[in-house]
């Protein structure tokens, strides 16, 4: 079974530009999560999508946005890039379960996209 | 507000030493608990999880964790570490529909 995939592996941008990161979940998973892993700060929750809807959002400014497509893949967009946005961006997927009123299951992580802002 | 605290940021052990990594959380309701591991150059992998039942949970690679509800803790243990256990370990707590990760503990095992 294929795991969570992310592209690109590395992304280099300059300050003020926009970055687009992509994620494909494990087949059958409907939930996609995005995290920022900056050096020494652990994982910071960014966004959660399930069934095409944004379900929850972390404490990040609105220039961090995303969407989930009908095939459950997801895109994270970061506008007006700042130097401190340099980090590893991780995507995770899980079986959503929201339709049944259940809490989402275990999250499985992709390898990440390393974003460097110069 | 929901939070997770990992007490040790860096741990250095010799091979065959015993390991215990602390994890405490704050959340008023029912929780699901996880430990993830990130080996150098690899992505996050699930070590073990607790949803309900026996509070002593066994995971992969000889790891185990014990959920102590009264102490809001979910400490990770391994009786005898190996050099290959060198990695960063993350505790995570899901309460309701939100999962919060701890800051991580970097473990270095000396051969």
Image (spheres, coloured by chain):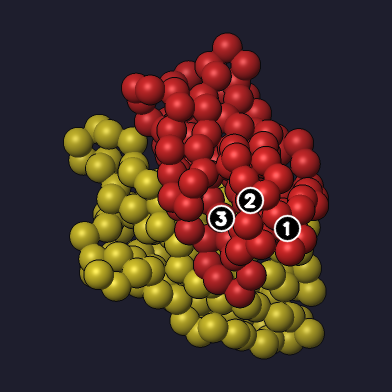
Q: Earlier in the sequence, mark 1 or mark 3?
A: 3
Residue A68 position in % (x across, y down): 35, 64
Q: Which of the two residues, A71 or A24, is positioned nearer the viewer here?
A: A24
Q: Is residue B27 above or below residue A10?
A: above
Left/right placement of residue B106 relative to residue B56 reads right
Q: Same subunit under labels 1 and 3?
A: yes
- The residue shown at (76%, 53%) is B14
Residue that carries the numbered disc 3 in the rendered image? B37
**Residue A52 in view:** yes
Q: How many marks?
A: 3
Residue that carries the numbered disc 2 in the rendered image? B81
Q: Residues within 10 Å of mark 3 (few under 14, many from 20)?
A: many
Q: Chain of mark 2?
A: B
Q: Are marks 1 and 2 in contact (CB under 8 Å)?
A: yes
Residue that carries the numbered disc 1 in the rendered image? B109
Left/right placement of residue A57 relative to residue A51 reads right
Residue B3 position in % (x across, y down): 64, 33
Residue A30 position in % (x across, y down): 27, 56
Q: Which chain is yellow?
A: A
Mark closer to the observer (3, 2): 2
Q: Which chain is red?
A: B
Residue reaching furthest to the top: B70
Q: Same subunit under labels 1 and 2?
A: yes
Quarter of the image for the N terminus of chain B: give it.
top right
Q: Chain of mark 3?
A: B
């Amino acid at each position: 079974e294929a795991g969570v995939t992310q592209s690109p592996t590395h992304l280099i941008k300059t300050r003020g530009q926009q970055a687009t990161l992509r994620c494909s979940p494990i087949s059958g998973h409907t939930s996609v999560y995005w995290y920022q892993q900056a050096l020494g700060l652990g994982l910071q929750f960014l966004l959660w999508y399930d069934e095409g809807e944004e379900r929850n959002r972390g404490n990040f400014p609105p220039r961090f946005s995303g969407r989930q497509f009908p095939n459950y893949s997801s895109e994270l967009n970061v506008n007006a890039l700042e130097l401190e946005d340099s980090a590893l961006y991780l995507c995770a997927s899980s079986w959503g379960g929201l339709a049944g009123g259940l809490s989402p299951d275990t999250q499985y992580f992709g390898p990440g996209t390393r974003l460097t802002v110069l | 507000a929901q939070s997770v605290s990992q007490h040790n940021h860096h741990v250095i052990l010799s091979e065959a030493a015993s390991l215990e990594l602390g994890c405490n959380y704050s959340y008023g309701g029912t929780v699901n608990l996880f430990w993830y591991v990130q080996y150098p150059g690899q992505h996050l992998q699930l070590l073990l999880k607790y949803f309900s039942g026996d509070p002593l949970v066994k995971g992969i690679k000889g790891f185990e964790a014990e959920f102590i509800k009264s102490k809001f803790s979910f400490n990770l243990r391994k009786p005898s570490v190996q050099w290959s256990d060198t990695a960063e370990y993350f505790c995570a707590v899901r309460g309701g529909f939100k999962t919060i990760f701890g800051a991580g503990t970097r473990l270095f095992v000396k051969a």
